[in-house]
Image: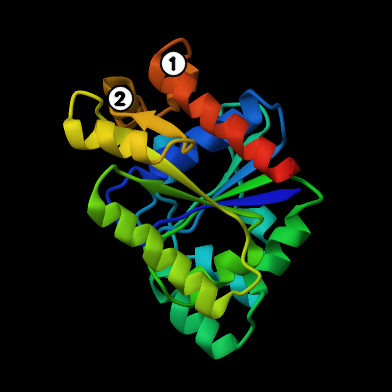
Amino acid sequence: MAVIAVYSVKGGVGKSTLAAALAWSSASVSRRRTLLWDLDVQGAAAFLLGHDRPRGQRAASVFTRDTDPAGLVIHTRWDRLDLLPADDSLREVDTLFARLGKRRRLGKLTDALAKDYERIVLDCPPVLNELSNQVIRAADLVVVPLPPSPLSRRALEAIRDELSRNHPKHPPILPVLSMVDMRRRLHRETVDEMQGWPVVPMSTHIEQMAARREPVGAFAPSTPAAQAMARVWTGIERKLCE
């Protein structure tokens, strides 16, 4: 089992879109039993898989062991792909962790879920707090989506600095250039400068994920956008095997 965290300290970078697409690729392309765990209170990853915010506030209760995570899991319409959705209770999760004083609670939960899943994809909120610390401790790989701009590169450096200070043995980081428009000079220059980084293009098909509420690979598999997502997933699998 491997845990892949899709994480950024900056919002609006295509994080949840990438998380949903990668989880679908894991289940449908690699044919692995996959769980998409939505830790972002906005619940965008679940929305993109066609599920509305659940009633009640139980998402945070899995960390106090009041609720078995398996009891909150939703089966999606795609074989081998399950979802653990977010709800408003996650707004207080940082306070909850401070009260519990358990530094590896999320890691222990993902370890327990390993009996049911080969890949767990975490859609993480754009924060630097105890939840992000728990994510880093649990993850085998951190995927960081970055639109091609100087501010996004600063966000990546902030993540690297944070990991160096607080997680000397942190998992590998895989930056992904997201929302790339090769008609724009800055985007072309960034792609040239960051050679070797996976690239996800700006695409109407990716935008349609929110309207259709399904991953781009499910409804437009032959498009450049879907093929780019597939290449990102292939890179992730390759990195996990290193």
In the rendered structure, find residue 71 and report the number of the disc placed on it.
Answer: none
Given residues 115 and 235, the one toward you in this image is: 235
Q: Give the amino acid type for the residue marked by disc 2 in the picture.
A: Gln
| Residue 220 appearing in the image | yes
Q: Give the amino acid type for the residue marked by disc 1 in the picture.
A: Phe
Location of residue 172 (image quadrant): bottom right
Location of residue 26 (image quadrant): top right
Given residues 173 and 40, the one toward you in this image is: 173
Q: Is residue 48 above or below residue 95?
A: above
Q: CA distance from mark 1 to mark 2?
A: 10 Å
Residue designated by label 2? 208
In the rendered structure, find residue 219 and report the number of the disc placed on it.
Answer: 1
Location of residue 192 (image quadrant): top left
Given residues 139 and 214, the one toward you in this image is: 139
* Residue lying at 50% horizontally and 51% vertically, measured from the top left: 85
Q: Is residue 23 left or right of residue 92?
A: right
Say which element carries label 2: helix
Question: Outermost residue toward the front?
Answer: 193
How has the structure been colored for display? rainbow
Q: Is residue 166 above or below residue 62?
A: below
The spot of residue 60 in percent (x, y) is 52, 69
The spot of residue 168 in percent (x, y) is 61, 74
Question: Looking at the image, how many numbered discs can be counted on the residues?
Answer: 2
Of the numbered discs 1 and 2, the one sitting upstream in the chain is 2
